Amino acid sequence: MGGFGSGRHGGRETTKDRYALDIRRLRWESPLTPGTTYIILEHQTRVRQGQWESRRDMVSLDWTDCHLGGRRAWFICPLCGRRVAMLYCGHVFACRGCHDLRHESQRENEEVRAFRRADNLRRKMGWIPGIAHGFGSKPKGMHWRTFARLASQYSIHVCSALAHAEEAMARARKTLGRIGGQN
């Protein structure tokens, strides 16, 4: 039980696995005016044995006032009634919760998460992504206090990522030792 390559792979669908409709982008690209109460979405979806079915769904909109003026549009999820910015395509357009979708980052293990956070901090500081590039210099215009805080956080994430990578290598060596000893 539990040989090389066994264990969980994949899992629940993520938001990247579905077509997403973003109200912010829709408002930017189309003449969606404040006060519009609904939109009609025409789309095709696959049903039994891969046959296509044409659908026409009405999705309600809600508008909220922004603090500095203007109005913000929201979808009202047709299944649960929540106010959301994104709807995802399935048999019907619905929110992430109704489709039981996860964000990609929710599937990351601690090692991958630490590497991603370190790379994000490198980008904030204007450095080339990848911990193999070492420390860079303080970006022009950044306060020393901010730079010190970001560099400290970066060091913590790099240490965490390397510790997890070392543990993974130790597990791999142990597994390969067992496989090599069976010959």
Image (tube, rainbow, N blue to C red):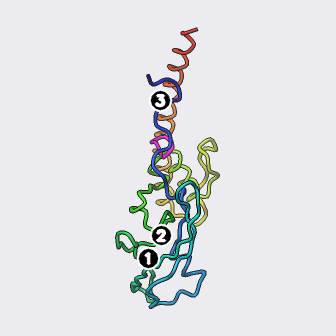
What percent of the width, then of the height, locates residue 134?
A: 61, 44
Tag 1 secondary structure:
strand
Nearer to us in this view, 1 or 78: 78
Circle 1 crowding by C-alpha within 10 Å: few under 14, some 14–19, many from 20 = many
Kind of residue sitting beneath label 2 = Met
Decide which of tag 3 and tag 1 comes sooner along the chain: 1
- Estimate the spatial distance between the alpha carbons at disc 2 and disc 3, rounded to whole Å: 38 Å
Kind of residue sitting beneath label 1 = Phe
Q: Which residues are magenta?
A: 108-113
As for residue 124 lying within the magenta part, the answer is no
- Estimate the spatial distance between the alpha carbons at disc 1 and disc 2, rounded to whole Å: 7 Å
Circle 2 crowding by C-alpha within 10 Å: few under 14, some 14–19, many from 20 = many
Circle 3 crowding by C-alpha within 10 Å: few under 14, some 14–19, many from 20 = few
> In percent of the image, x 46 and y 89: which residue is there?
36
Residues marked 1 and 2 touching at CB (< 8 Å): yes
Decide which of tag 1 and tag 2 comes sooner along the chain: 1
Tag 2 secondary structure:
strand
Report the side of 82 relative to 102 (left or right).
left
Kind of residue sitting beneath label 3 = Glu
Instruction: Find residue 86 and name its label.
Output: 2
Residues marked 2 and 3 touching at CB (< 8 Å): no
What percent of the width, then of the height, locates residue 6?
A: 49, 29
> In percent of the image, x 43 and y 60: which residue is there?
99
The residue tagged 3 is 167
The residue tagged 1 is 75
